[in-house]
Amino acid sequence: MDGAGEAELDFGVGRFFRGQAEEALWKIECTQERFVERDPLLSRIALDPRIMVGQPMVRGTRLTSFILGRLAHGSAVEELLSEYGGLTREDVQACLLWRTPL
């Protein structure tokens, strides 16, 4: 394949993945709206496939579900709050609520 053919292939693949990313973002926005309707506290949880591979995280941070793991292994909420200055008690509550079944 010559250089021009490869460029066209790359562009086509890139366009395909961009379409998938846009669809994923739309699905995530719909999911977040449904959860926030359930409880406004959940607005503290963000989903974005471009950040942390789409894992739920505390909005404005890159703190993911490891918070739940820390709590499960005996860390106190106060300990987490002191270690992560931007984290609030409501953020921790939102993490717990996020993992609660509907």
Image: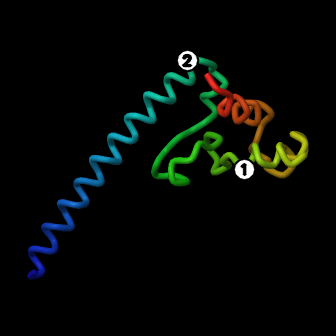
Where on the picture, by quarter, is residue 40?
A: top right
x, y percent for residue 32: 51, 29
Residue receiving disc 1: 66
Q: Which quadrant would residue 35 be assigned to in this image?
A: top right
Tag 1: amino acid: Phe
Residue depicted at 81% across the width and 48% down the height: 70
Q: For the C terminus, which image quadrant?
A: top right
What residue is shown at x 68% (from left), y 49% (from top)?
Answer: 63
Check disc 2 and report the residue beneath it: 37
Q: In the rendered image of this protein, does residue 82 appear above or below residue 7?
A: above
Q: Is residue 24 above or below residue 96?
A: below
Q: Which mark is residue 20?
A: none
Q: Position of residue 51 (x, y in %)?
A: 52, 52
Q: Amino acid at mark 2?
A: Glu
Label 1 Cα crowd, 10 Å radius (few <14 / some 14-19 / many 20+): few
Q: Position of residue 30 (x, y in %)?
A: 43, 28
**Left or right of 13, for residue 81:** right
Q: Is residue 3 above or below residue 96?
A: below
